[in-house]
Every structure is written in structure tokens, then in C-alpha cells.
Image (tube, rainbow, N blue to C red):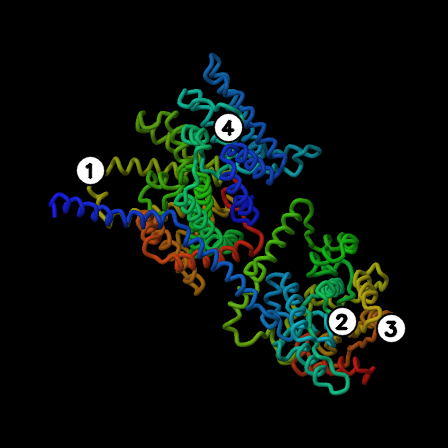
Amino acid sequence: MNPELKISSQTAKRAARAKAPYSKLRKARYGYYGIAFALLLFILTQFAASYMVKLDTVYKHRLNYDMFLEDAKVMGIVVDEMAREIKDKGLTNYAILIGNSVAWGTNESSDHSLGRYLSDAATADEDDKLEAVFNLSAPSIMAGDAYTLLLMLDEHGIKTDNVMIGLTYSSFVQGGSGVRKVFWLGDDLKKQDPAMFEKVLPHLEANGYKNMTGWKETEHNAIDAVSEWIPVVKYKTVIQESIKQSGKKSDLMGDPRAWDEKKFSEKWITSPQYLNFFNPEPFDMSEANWSVYFMNRIAEHQQGKRLFVFVAGSNGELSKQEVTHPGYIANMEKIDTYLSEFGAEYVILQDRIAPNLFTDHVHLTKEGNEQLARIIWDTWKGKES
Amino acid sequence: MLFNSPTFLLFLVVVFGLYYAFPRGRMMILALANAAFYAYAGVGYFLLFGAIVASVYFISKGLQGPRGKLALGLGLAVVLGNLLFFKYSMFLLENIESMLGMTFSLQGTAFDDRMIALPIGISFYSFQLIAYLVDVHRGQLKPSRSLFEFWVFISLFAHSAAGPILRGNDFIPQLRNIRSILFRAPRVKLGMAFILLGLFKKVVIVEQIAPYVNDYFAKAQTLSGVESWIASYLFAFQIYFDFSAYSEMAVGIGFLLGLRLDLNFKTPYLSANPAEFWRRWHITLSQWIRDYIFIPLGGSRVANWRIYANLIAAMTISGIWHGAAWTFVIWGFYHGLLSAGHRMYAKGIARLGWKQIHNNGLYKVFSIFVFFHLTVVGWVFFRANSWSDALYLLRKMTMLDGIQFSKQHLLLLAVIAGLYLLHIMESIVVSRFQRWSLAWQLYVPSIIRGAVYAVIAVILLILLMKGESSGFIYFQF
């Protein structure tokens, strides 16, 4: 071979070898493979998030309060997942329980909560069995929240043929308490029933609700709408709280011991929050009281469907001074009269549960919750009046 | 519009898309985007900003004419008048009242609550306008060709809220070539990397530190010596990560659009002296102070005592620029003293023939340690809610009242050590960025890179959408 040709061929090979890393470098710098894979994995993550969040991620005999506390929109997720479960299991005969911290089961774990015992009783009963009881209660839920929840259930196609509403004396305590009567779900009420929202807005704003309007509202709604389409965003609170809670052995919130096994400081039983719970000022049972107003709307909503109301009692020992106050007694009678004209089945539970089954002034121990479930279920079935 | 809000990210995507889809309309797209960005904060302030920019533009037409000085004076009066009114009028009024021992009644006026809301970015755009006026008057910069161009230069959304402070000579030529900017993948990737770095600093680091800092400074007068140090250390990192996060996002946005914006930070807590610190902290402000205050005052070409006085004056003005409160004035003055003190010290070292000491590694580490702590002491003035809080914290920081650690203190000190380590790592990564980024793209399989990007995107998205985005500290200046 011509030596010159040989040299030129070697040079060409060297040049090709030298060129190869450059083309690799150029490909790396200008290529989009990394970003394309990122996009693909990001989309797959959305499917995974959507698949992994189920009803039991956000609900176990009651909603996961830590998640709800972090973001009230979790209630919407619970309702979504409930609708999915009802559809998947083909449930047709179920009840919805909506109440405050007593019905949720403060100071006890979900396994010892009212939701669990009521569900057990209702699904085990041979005569008049229900397929499930869904407990949408949460601490501080007010009549306005309960009404909003019923509208949310309607929107999701969840039947409200059997509804149980759990109240306490404090549910009817009025103005000046600083507690708004749509405590959690103001934004949802705005979407579900704008006219009613407008009507109640002055009361809500007077009690700390921040109503977004104009551009801010449009922006907020747009972000919400976009979030619905991105599961990792939609479930962000659920994902974060699930990770946080994964190491926890129990979902107990509070101290489950009976009230007489622990100390209640003078400061606690004279605190404004405690005293306001038993506020003896005469109740106005007209629609000027927002609790009454919303209860009436609930009654209208439930026309032709079954509605049951229970008013949980207070601890007759720890809060003896408060529950024996003439104002308290008179107000309880007003509640009784109101409910008797309300057009729904109801039960008032003051002094029906022994004081030693309370964990504090109003919440119940495991045994207390069992007894409350029994009373509710028996009354529901007509065994007890 | 906060850079760490979903709305801004959506806004950026739209601007980015339109910018490359319509190269001929880029100036118009940016002009409208800037207007929308500013109007989002308040239409009234947008109109005010627009009026100031327009006034300065028209005044600047006369800067190179026979009445240049008059035009300069008028331009400065408009810019400084606006700044003085919004930022300093109430501060001045309160001090006059305090001196006279009386209170003027503002009832029935628009200021009866004694508050004037500060337009976003007023300090930044004012300094930028001053630089423009002075540069054009000096003949160092050709005036803008049109109001349109001038508006885009001053109000570019990437920097209008909190800098970097752009100079006409650097930026206007870029705008004139804007149509020819091509979409280049490496530059866009770099821009995205800067934006992600900024977002990471803001949502992962700052958002976690901020509650502790706020809590500590809110109850400043109850803190122990150890807690006072912890509060000051944490604030030092909060303000650094917060401001550098914003600045890096601004630079990243610039890269996305093919525009070069200056970096404002170069790991400043690794500085061994004040001069180095101001070359690494809020660089564009330091350069502005040097060019438009320190040098006009005589700079380093005057007698020694005047240099010291100039340093102190320049830094005190920098303090006043940050905010209308005596704590900012003292912070600036303190840094002026540090700068003058260091200059004196350096001269002493040189006179003794010990210059070699600067090459000693141990001395360097010791200097960084000392200067970092002097900086942290300075932050007390900057962050304290009042003068008395600042004095209380400083007294406690002498540790004369004893030293007591709780478990939480040790944990927070460990966090602070971790943050400093992160700062060192940042410096290492930045110095080797080009090599490492190439290695990352060349040797790491694209599926792994993609997985890392996806994880980062998911985490940032979750944190970004967590609740209401918190503002950047420097937005208040």
C-alpha cells in the first residue's frame, strides 16, 4: 500500500475518533432525553399517586383529622373517595353521619370511635341492616358545614337517603362566640350554594373568614382547577401526612383516660372556650341563629329522606355547675322543643351516658362511644325513643 | 407576583412560549409582560412606575445638551422625590416630631394611619434610573432610542422587584439584539437549573428556617445568649438563601430568554474581610454604591482619613437604602466601620511586612470565622424589630449572663452547622459547575437524570402548592 495513503487513512481514523466524543458531548448538551424521561416519569407519578390514594388513606371509621387540619380540602378528597368506593362496591343502602368532635371521637383512636361502633352495629344487625355508615364528622363542624357537606354529597352522586346529624349544646350557642357557623367549608359553600353563601357572608367575615374576590378569587380558582388535574398536587397534603403518619402506631388524638383519672386545671375549667361551650344566655331558636337557619335548610334538603338528629350530652359531674345552671336547662328545653317541631327523629342524650364514660366535659371513652353508638342505632331502628 | 408562586411559573411559561414563537415581537411581549407583572401588585403603583419611567426617559433627552446639568438635577429630583416620599417621608416626619417633642396631626389626610404602602421594587428601580441618568450625563452611555426600549430595560420582570440592578451599558445592547437570540438548549437548561436552584433554596431551606427566626425575633427580649446567637445565625442564612434564591431565579429567567443578568451572590459567608464580602454579597448594589457614591466622594484617591469617612458614608447610605429605620442606618454604619477598620488593619499588616500572612491557610480560615461572626452581629441590627431589641440581643450575645444549652438549642446549632456546610458545598459546586454539569450529562444515563429531575419537580411542586407563598425579604426594600 502507498505509505502516503496509509498515513492519510490513519489521520482520518484519528479525526473520526476525535470527532466521536465531540458529537457525544454535543448530543449531551443539546439532547432532550433527560427532560423527556423526566416528563414521562412525572406523568407516571401522577398515575401512581392517583392509584395509591384510596378511601382508607384518608378515612378510617372517620376522616383523618391531621390531614383535614392541614388542609380543609381533604374533605373533598374524602367525599371523592367515598363516591368511588360506593360505586366500586355497588353500595345502595348506607348512612351518612355528620357531627362534631363527639361524633368524630376526640380523645380516642379511630378503632374506638363512634364511627367504628355505629358502623359495626349497623352492618351486623340482622333485621334492618345497612351496608355501611360513613362518618364525615370532624371537630368543630357546625350546622353550616353539615349542610355544605350534604350539597357536596349530592354533587358526587352520593345518596343522602339516610343522614344522621350529631350536635351538642354548643352547636346552638350564638353570636359573640367567635365561632362561625360554617367553620371549615366556607369555600365549598360558596361553590355549592352561592346565594346562601352571600347571605351568611357577613357572619362569616365577622368571625374571621377571609373571602376572596375579584382577580384573587379567579386566580385561586384557576390554581384549584389546574391542581385537580395534577394528582401529586391534588393529594399533596395526603401524601405528606401519610409519610409523616407512616411511623405512628395509633391515630389516637388526645388522652383516652376517663376524666376522673386525670387533672383538669382551674385555668382550663374557667377558660373562655370552656365556659362558652355551656353559655347559658337564652338561645334564640329563630332563623336569626345561624345554627337554626342551617338546620332548617338541612331539614328542607332531607324532605322525603330519612334524617336523624342526636344531641350529645355533657359530663354531669365534671361540668355539674354548668349543666345544672337554669340557663343551660332552659336552653336544652328549647332545643328539645325545636327538634320536636323539626320533623326529624331525634334523641337528646344529656344524662343518658354515665359521667365515668367521659374523657372530659363532652368527649367519650371507648365504652362511652360504644354506648352512644348503641343508643343511636337503637333509636334509629325504633327500639328506643 | 412572587417567583415562588404557581401563578408566576404559569406566567413565565406563557412568556417563554410567546417569546420564542414570535421573535419579531419580543420587545412588545416583554413590555406587556413587565406591565402585567407590575400591575399584578397594584394598578396604581404600576401607573406611578410608568409615569416615573416616562418622565426620566423624556428628561434624559436633554442630558447631553447645553442644559445637561439642569436635566440631570430634574431627573434626580423626580426619582429621589418619588423614593423619598414613599420610603422615607414617614420616617423623617417621626424623627422631626421626636426632635421637636410634638406630634403633627395627619387626621383627615390620606396618611392618617401614618402608613404609606411601598411600591414593589422602588429602591431597585430608583437606583437603576439614577445610574442611567448619571451615565448618560457623563457620556458613558448613549440614551435609549425609544421609550419602549427604556421601559423594557428598567422594568424587566425578571429583576424589577428585587434586582439585580442592571446597567444600561450591559443591558440595552442586549435588548437591541433581541430578535437574533436563538433558542439554544444548553442555555435554556442552564436557566432551568438556576430557577430550580432558587426554588429549592426558597421552598426547601428558607421556608423551614423562617418560622424559627420570626418566633425568636418576636420575643427578642426574652432570649438567652445562646438563643440570641441562634436567632442571628438563622437569620444570616435565611436572608442569604432568600435573596440569593430570588437573584438566581432572576438570572435563570434571563438565560431562558437569552439575556445575561448579573449574579448577585458568590457564597459571601466564605469572605475573610469586608472588602471581599461586598464583592460577594449583593454584588450589583455594592458596585452601584462604589460607582455612584464612593468614587464621586473621592474614592481611594484622597487622604486616608477621607477614605475612611467615604467608606463609612457609602455604607451608611447603603443601610438607609435598605429601609427607613434607625436599625438599617446603624447596620450600614457598622459595615462602614468594619470596612474602614479592615483597611486600617491591612495597612498596618503591610507596614509591618506581614503580607505573607494572607497566604496562610489557617489565617484564612480564622479570618473567615471572625468575619462571618462580625457579619452575624451586623444582622442583629438589620432584623431586630426595634433598636432596644437589637441592643438587648447584642448584650445577651456577649454571653456574660452564662451559657446554657437545651436539646433544642443543640439541634438548631446542628442545623446551622449544616447550613454552613451547604454554603461551602455551594461554593465547591459553583467553582466546578461546568465540569460537573458536563460529566452529569455525558456519563449519567438519561433515564437516571430524568428520574432525578422528575423527583425534584414533584417535591418542588408539592412544596410550592403547599399554601400561600411567602414573599422574598428584599421585596420590602
The residue labelled by disc 3 is: A340
A371 vs B153, nearest the viewer: B153
Label 4 element class = helix
Q: Nearer the viewer, mark 4 or mark 3?
A: 4
**Residue plotted at (20% across, 37% down):** B352
Above or below — where is A253 with respect to A151?
below
CA–CA distance in space, label 4 to label 2 = 65 Å
User: Which residue is the site of mark 1?
Assistant: B352
Chain to which the residue tagged by mark 2 belongs: A
Q: Amino acid at mark 3?
A: Ser
Q: Which residue is mark 2?
A: A165
Dividing the picture into quadrants, the one containing residue B292 is: top left
Query: Residue B106: image x %, image y %?
Result: 67, 33
Instruction: Indicate the secondary structure of the residue bearing disc 2.
Output: strand
- Mark 1 vs mark 4, foreground winner is 4
| Chain letter for the residue marked with disc 4 in the picture | B
At mark 1, the secondary structure is helix
Q: Residue at x 52, y 65 (%)?
A: A48
